[in-house]
Image (tube, helix red, strand yellow):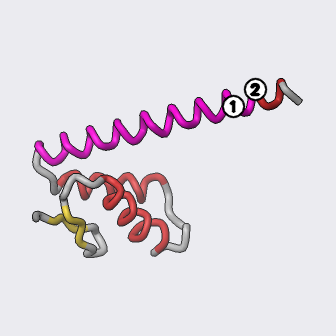
Amino acid sequence: MRTIKTTTGADIPLDGDLLTVMETLYREVTARRELERSFEDMAREIAHLVGQMTQEERDTYLQESLFLNSVTYENERLGSYIRKLAEENT
């Protein structure tokens, strides 16, 4: 399995698992800097990782990202609707 590296040298296996990439980003950018990171810091790290991927790998991770974001969006909308219903019933 092919791997890419973060700017700190951490390996990320490219097995199509977006959560592995996200967990590594959190650990290497956010946790390593004790939550003292900026939008630009994270954007640079993401660009660094994407720059190491083939077009096929980028396509795979884009699809995973869109799926995860659509599920997150749906859950947030549903949560808002349920809270609204609960408020109306109290």
**Label 2's element?**
helix
Categorize mark 1 by other alpha carbons within 10 Å: few (<14), some (14-19), many (20+).
few
Q: Which residue lies furthest to the right in this view?
A: 90
Q: What residue type is labelled 2?
A: Leu
Given residues 81 and 21, the one toward you in this image is: 81
User: On the rendered structure, is 65 left or right of 85?
Assistant: left
Q: Which residue lies furthest to the front in this view?
A: 89
**Image location (x, y in percent) of residue 33:** 49, 73
Given residues 18 and 5, the one toward you in this image is: 18
Categorize mark 2 by other alpha carbons within 10 Å: few (<14), some (14-19), many (20+).
few
Q: Name the residue under label 2.
A: 85
Screen quadrant of the N terminus: bottom left
Tell me the magenta residue range: 55-84
User: On the rendered structure, is 21 left or right of 58?
Assistant: right
User: On the rendered structure, is 43 left or right of 37?
Assistant: left
The total number of labels drawn is: 2
**Image location (x, y in percent) of residue 85:** 75, 26
Q: Specify the principal SS of the magenta part.
A: helix
Q: Above or below — where is 15 with respect to 54?
A: below
Q: What residue is drawn where x is 19% and y is 57%?
A: 15
Q: What residue is drawn where x is 79% and y is 31%?
A: 86
Q: What residue type is labelled 1?
A: Ile
Is the C-beta separation of discs 2 and 1 under 8 Å? yes
**Label 1's element?**
helix
Given residues 33 and 12, the one toward you in this image is: 12
Given residues 26 and 85, the one toward you in this image is: 85
